[in-house]
């Protein structure tokens, strides 16, 4: 089979800049691609790299798209090199979209709203710092019951103070995830885990600290492995398992904690399926701030592969304008 291949770069501004230990992020840039098969069937895909997280850069993805011919084959789509994981995801998911294997609920145009799971199955991202104290309530009213808060952004003493306020204001049965983005020292990681273990042991807290995400930098895998056996509080790897190759390596090295999977940058969906089916790992699926196009493909994979009822990290719509039809205009000049 051959496909007509077209692509358009896009830029999308965050309503509020996103603050993590990696710095501030103001504009999401990516590529929307379209494959049209010989019978005229269309499949949409999205390449949404995050190079500081471990994927290729936008420039590398653009270069790859520009050097491709206008007509491409299955062989090209399924042999994209591992150095371009966001491209692997974008092309394969466009191929799947066009193949119709996701069923009738997916339409040929990307403005179709995909069937969304209820907010309760999503984890909502709180803003970093004190702002979290003012925002959880709105999100709670929208139905979210799991929240993620970024740590490792400010001084640990300040964060522990805000954390104490936060856990005593959140309603009972809320789940809270703490994401350090690799920004803690070994001592700080111990302090956070010890604090969370103590809260649990005292049993006075009506909320649950679900896990601490990526406490230490990627290079400190052995320390994280050790921490995961020292404390009760679970640890999830995220930056350490950004791509399928890293995920397999951490599994081989003995990681049996939680794996955060970002379908948008992890690589080939077909190989991810194989890996998850073979090893039955404990996963949390999560967004890369993709548009509705990448999100449909990511949620499709999530629905297939998520098996432990953990909330999925796609509660990020409040970081963008609601209107999702802007990408239609990308194609007006065709
Ligand atoms: Mg994370």
Image (cartoon, helix red, strand yellow):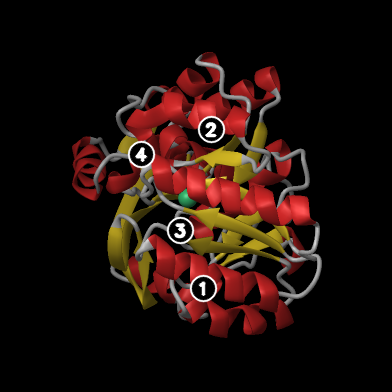
User: Residue at coordinates 72% horizontally, 48% vertically from top-left?
Assistant: 310
Q: Earlier in the sequence, mark 2 or mark 1?
A: 1
Asked which quadrant contains residue 233, the reply is top right
Of badges 3 and 1, nearer the viewer stands: 1
- Judged from the image, the secondary structure of the residue bearing numbered disc 1 is helix
Residues under numbered marks 4 and 2 in contact, where contact means CB atoms less than 8 Å apart: no
Helix, strand or loop for disc 3: loop
- Tell which of 320 and 168 is nearer to you: 168
Q: Which residue is mark 3?
A: 290
**Mark 3 nearby-residue class (10 Å; few <14, some 14–19, many ≥20):** many
Q: Is residue 122 left or right of residue 92?
A: right
Q: CA distance from mark 3 to mark 4?
A: 24 Å
- First reached walking from the N terminus: tag 1 or tag 4: 1
Which residue has dot 4 on it? 217
Image point (71%, 39%), residue name: 304
Could you say where residue 120 lies in the image, as x and y percent from the top left? 76, 65
Q: Earlier in the sequence, mark 3 or mark 4?
A: 4
The residue mark sitting in front, 3 or 4, is 4
Q: Which residue is mark 2?
A: 227
Q: Of callouts 2 and 3, which one flags the residue occurring earlier in the amino acid sequence? A: 2
Residue 273 left/right relative to 319:
right
Percent across and percent down for residue 296 are 59, 54
Label ID, residue 162: 1
């Amino acid at each position: 089979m051959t496909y007509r291949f077209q692509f358009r770069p896009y830029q999308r501004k965050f309503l509020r800049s996103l603050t993590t230990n990696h710095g501030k992020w103001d504009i999401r840039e990516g590529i929307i691609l379209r494959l049209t098969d010989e019978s005229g069937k269309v499949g949409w895909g999205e390449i949404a790299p995050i190079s500081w997280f471990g994927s290729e850069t936008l420039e590398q993805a653009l270069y790859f798209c520009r050097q491709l011919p206008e007509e491409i084959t299955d062989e090209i789509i399924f042999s994209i090199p591992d150095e371009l994981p966001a491209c692997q995801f974008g092309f394969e998911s466009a191929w799947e979209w066009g193949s119709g294997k996701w069923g009738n609920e997916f339409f040929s145009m990307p403005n179709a709203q995909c069937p969304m799971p209820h907010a309760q199955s999503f984890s909502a991202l709180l803003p970093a710092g004190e702002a979290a104290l003012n925002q959880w309530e709105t999100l709670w009213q929208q139905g979210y019951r799991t929240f993620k808060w970024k740590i490792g952004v400010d001084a640990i003493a300040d964060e522990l103070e805000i954390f104490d306020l936060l856990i005593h204001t959140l309603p009972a049965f809320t789940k809270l995830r703490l994401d350090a983005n690799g920004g803690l020292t070994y001592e700080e990681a111990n302090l956070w885990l010890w604090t969370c273990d103590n809260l649990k042991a005292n049993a006075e807290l009506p909320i649950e600290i679900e896990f601490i995400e990526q406490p230490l930098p990627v290079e400190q895998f052995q320390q994280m492995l050790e921490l995961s056996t020292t404390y009760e509080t679970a640890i999830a790897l995220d930056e350490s398992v950004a791509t399928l190759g890293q995920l397999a390596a951490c599994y081989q090295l003995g990681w049996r904690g939680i794996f955060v999977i970002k379908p948008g940058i992890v690589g080939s969906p077909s190989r991810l399926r194989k890996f998850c089916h073979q090893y039955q790992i404990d996963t949390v699926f999560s967004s890369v701030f993709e548009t509705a196009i990448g999100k449909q493909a990511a949620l499709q994979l999530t629905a297939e592969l998520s098996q432990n009822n953990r909330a999925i990290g796609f509660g990020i719509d409040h970081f963008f304008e609601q209107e999702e039809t802007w990408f239609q205009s990308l194609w007006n000049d065709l």
